[in-house]
Amino acid sequence: MTMSDNLHLFNQLGVVKRNIVRADKAAVEKLSRFGVSTLHEAMGRVGLMKPYMRPIYPSARICGTAVTILLQPGDNWMMHVAAEQLQPGDVAVAACTTDNDDGFFGDLLATSFRSRGAIGLIIDGGVRDVTDLTEMNFPVFSRAIHSKGTIKATLGSVNVPVVCAGAFVNPGDVIVADIDGVVVIPAARAMEVANAAEKREALEADKRAQFASGALGLDMYKMREPLEKAGMRYID
Amino acid sequence: MTMSDNLHLFNQLGVVKRNIVRADKAAVEKLSRFGVSTLHEAMGRVGLMKPYMRPIYPSARICGTAVTILLQPGDNWMMHVAAEQLQPGDVAVAACTTDNDDGFFGDLLATSFRSRGAIGLIIDGGVRDVTDLTEMNFPVFSRAIHSKGTIKATLGSVNVPVVCAGAFVNPGDVIVADIDGVVVIPAARAMEVANAAEKREALEADKRAQFASGALGLDMYKMREPLEKAGMRYID
Amino acid sequence: MTMSDNLHLFNQLGVVKRNIVRADKAAVEKLSRFGVSTLHEAMGRVGLMKPYMRPIYPSARICGTAVTILLQPGDNWMMHVAAEQLQPGDVAVAACTTDNDDGFFGDLLATSFRSRGAIGLIIDGGVRDVTDLTEMNFPVFSRAIHSKGTIKATLGSVNVPVVCAGAFVNPGDVIVADIDGVVVIPAARAMEVANAAEKREALEADKRAQFASGALGLDMYKMREPLEKAGMRYID
Amino acid sequence: MTMSDNLHLFNQLGVVKRNIVRADKAAVEKLSRFGVSTLHEAMGRVGLMKPYMRPIYPSARICGTAVTILLQPGDNWMMHVAAEQLQPGDVAVAACTTDNDDGFFGDLLATSFRSRGAIGLIIDGGVRDVTDLTEMNFPVFSRAIHSKGTIKATLGSVNVPVVCAGAFVNPGDVIVADIDGVVVIPAARAMEVANAAEKREALEADKRAQFASGALGLDMYKMREPLEKAGMRYID
Amino acid sequence: MTMSDNLHLFNQLGVVKRNIVRADKAAVEKLSRFGVSTLHEAMGRVGLMKPYMRPIYPSARICGTAVTILLQPGDNWMMHVAAEQLQPGDVAVAACTTDNDDGFFGDLLATSFRSRGAIGLIIDGGVRDVTDLTEMNFPVFSRAIHSKGTIKATLGSVNVPVVCAGAFVNPGDVIVADIDGVVVIPAARAMEVANAAEKREALEADKRAQFASGALGLDMYKMREPLEKAGMRYID
Amino acid sequence: MTMSDNLHLFNQLGVVKRNIVRADKAAVEKLSRFGVSTLHEAMGRVGLMKPYMRPIYPSARICGTAVTILLQPGDNWMMHVAAEQLQPGDVAVAACTTDNDDGFFGDLLATSFRSRGAIGLIIDGGVRDVTDLTEMNFPVFSRAIHSKGTIKATLGSVNVPVVCAGAFVNPGDVIVADIDGVVVIPAARAMEVANAAEKREALEADKRAQFASGALGLDMYKMREPLEKAGMRYID
């Protein structure tokens, strides 16, 4: 089975896919060493969710494989359906069929998700019980914090491809989230991106040292000539 | 005097009502034991302010009786008028006749409010001196943080019913606020809601234990049959 | 050279001005003793940036002289050009020719800026590497946190007058930023504003004491008569 | 029965009130002669919904008595329940328990509402079939235009008091809407406000003539003295 | 070649795919008879772009096959690259790697696109020359109208799968847009959706007649029993 | 007197400047022949107000010299002060000391402004009486349409430099507004910009003809080589 086999399931309602291809564990582990900004660069500057997705506490950090959830507005039924599909190391990634800030998730579901091995939640919707979630150290990145309760009445889906906060997510993709944002790394590219991130960080350490010693990017990156060519004028 | 006697005063300008019926102290004390999300559920999923209302520091928490303030844009005159009406255990709840982020409130007014016994402020507007307010541990929930100064020129009102951040507030209602948001509990329903919250929390403790031990909501809430009836398909 | 000499350079692209007139050091030092809200009042209630400008960590605080940067969307080339113009005590103030939340600035540039003596950044755009910046204790006030990478392809300018987050900033102006917001104090008015702030704070200390002892603003500011004149009605 | 008798029903879910006290027909007729801005002034500058409420076509105009609807997000079941309660001259006023832009209403419901005598819709939510609604000349003021379909699963209410787009609405209140916005006039004040509007418009005709002939507000309203007193400086 | 073969190209930069599989012409023709709201329902209530996408003039309408464009912020280079790939009946669908309101498109590009046979543009960005575009009757749906000019410096892509205004779009998919919004119909489902829309419209004609004659949805849809079961209370 | 002489008046409150240097009449006349997008390009891609500024009717168009107004929130006193300073061909440009959507301006003030010779209004605030203004054909570009009434209590200024909707405006500058937005052209550059616009339009006519005949921008602008150099890959 390949990633693209899932595309016919994109946004389809009323479906739970049980067997998904999770990204390679070693790659996930390696990706976990890097920050979101580094990984986004290593991927070629794509894959980010919108910046309105914020952590519920500043130190929240996630790196794991996506179990996707497609919610209906004001309805968190699929959260319970998803719980059964979660495995150790998974991250629940919840999209909604429309923009909705209701509180789809709180400390009870977090307890359930954690008992299944899940390590966090990314939700293009609202979340509540933030004090409890913070005490549990259960990381959530959401578009809103909102007490508004939800019902359990309408089918969405679990483990179909979704668009979450502007990013396309396939079940099994690697999700990395920290205070800089949320990045989605396709399962098939996980190790390649981890390796690229490693190289990038090695280079950055060197650059940081140069900058710290007073070197200018103008010289390090040989920008003076292209600036002049572009017509930059220095005046006094 | 009953709550509804005030309705003819709704949004009326140029009025200060001195005698208001505050919610029962025992009910307020009992409500203070519960979080906003629990209370919102206990009320039947109504009574919340909009989620743009955020605490100025994460641990801010309020539970008290509302003294309402109707502000004019860019004008905080009514804050001083309200100070005189505040009693121990009160929460100032400030609405505005239009959307306005100006800094209507700072550390001087907080000092004044506190010396009257007030325990916090809910404001559908801006607030400033946040460092001082945080050091004072004076909780404020607001739509903005903004230094913009205000004048004292136009009449608003104190202790008339208002709409604040989408919620209808009668003077004397109970206001509970924490990191999940702000909920308004009508004075007449205070003890009923506190009791309902107590029951809900007892039930939640049991559910939390079940979830922690690995039980699924699908089984606990007997969702498998309704899901099947609704047409949910499990695929591999 | 006077401040107004620069106006013909407003928003001009492709220019780096090397010699700017920085506000008097003694005035900057004196301004650093006051908060943004006090300084905004001392200036006559003008000079604030929009309240969407927020610190990346709550204790972030800046007081220094502006080196202005005019960015193009998705392009941080001018950050490197600006680095060379930074002097000890400077604050980089970055505007953009259009609204853009990309991550123009991260820990490498912060290292470079700091090595030049800069003490912080104000940016009407996005910033990243927030964990590193927080650990470095390098204060940034921005419109967004966003990992999105930028290119180095198009000319903007350095040290031309700009509009940043709704405020007009001349290079050399004093920028003060804290959790209440960001205020721009024209270089020519720096000492005058510092002195006015000093007077204001002295007055506030006295008022604070009166408020703390239970005095009402209604009496302290003699508001009862003007309220009555304006038609305020007290009812029971 | 008085208006305030309904307050205990505010935001209550699962209730349909059949008998409501509609504003006096003659007052409604008289109110229909005035624009929203005039009526808002005649009421004392209160009663407006938020300015995000926009007509689906520029000439849309409504003046009638409110039948209120409390919707749940993504659910338009109550629209059908409300249809039965609509009488000739009524305006449906739909609030929602949370912010939601889904398309709760289209041409079929408009046909149903019109056949009951309803003359328009105010909805703090989304609407669709705008081409058909425009051809039908069925005026709608909404927070969004959105095709997103809704379900019929959860109880809201009909003819309970609601907060709609920031305004408190009692069933039976007069709703006037035009391109300037939406104003809510309490049933009990309908004739008083109509009379005040009439006076205001008479005065405005005279002022308009004076302005047209070149008179200045400075002189007409005798502002020169108060301006001078306030410290206005004229410079050359 | 199937649709899913393209998924590895999702968001990839620096690629132009020349041969894409466009939806069947007969299906596109049939889809053109229906409105966006009908098609969205016929698809199972998915496939919509966000409601911030608005037509530049009210009568704008589009139905055609997507040629996708991935833009960089402030850069419209790929518009010219895309022009070469446009065929009669195509709709240009432009996404951007970040939120950006710049004016990527105006009357010159519209002239070019039209000369290639393109029938409109969907852009998650800004557009300008709206007077000319309206006179040309060239329909555009955009997130903003903005004069801001763009450069031609950085590679994006043409005919890779993209996320545009929250919707996933594969090159060749059918795009239908009208005043209700924008819907994306996967090429493989085009005829199925057209047929479903046809059935839905037939049903709606009948329902419209019933509603027009005064029938209630409560009776037509047999809602009275489920309402009662759900606990609805009718009071007087 | 030069433009920069005014800078010390920037944002100063309580000042009316009577003698301002208006842009050359011939230059204004020439600028009136061009659209906002053309002029913005001719200026070097600067000078635009934010795109939230929208015309109250689609055909609204303005080209004239700025009389600036600095408003206080909820207060339109300065509108009357400004009326006296308006001369034939002037455009009132109103900024506010904070974001505020109140209805500062309606048909009475429009009648007054027109009787003084003013040809339109640009306001970073709200406007009302839109039906009347449209019938009068009095063009207004605003951030909101809102009935909310204002008071006359606090000093702002007239003819001081202001920041309006993100653009710096000096009294006397040329303001051009159409459906694409609002551009500010410094008085000193008026003729230069008009000439540049003229050249640009001549070039565009030729390009339009080429595009209409099927030529590609790729060839007209010789983009194929730089695209290849940048690494663009064409695939099938």
Image (cartoon, coloured by chain):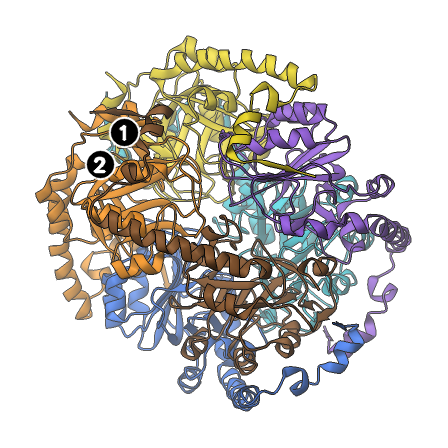
Chain colours: A brown, B blue, C orange, D cyan, E purple, F yellow
| For the residues bearing labels 1 and 2, Cβ distance under 8 angstroms | yes
Q: Quadrant of residue B85?
A: bottom left
Question: Which chain is disc 1 placed on?
Answer: C
Disc on the earlier residue, 1 or 2: 1
Q: Amino acid at mark 1?
A: Val
Question: Which chain is disc 2 placed on?
Answer: C
Is residue A32 depicted above or below C202 in this figure? Answer: below
Q: Amino acid at mark 2?
A: Gln
State the residue position of label 2: C85
Along the line of sight, which residue is nearer the eye, A202 or B80? A202
Is residue F2 depicted above or below C128 in this figure? Answer: above
Within-10-Å neighbours for mark 1: few <14, some 14–19, many 20+ = many
Same chain? Circles 1 and 2: yes
Q: Position of residue E58 (x, y in %)?
A: 69, 35
* SS of the residue under disc 2: loop
Q: Position of residue A149 (x, y in %)?
A: 58, 72
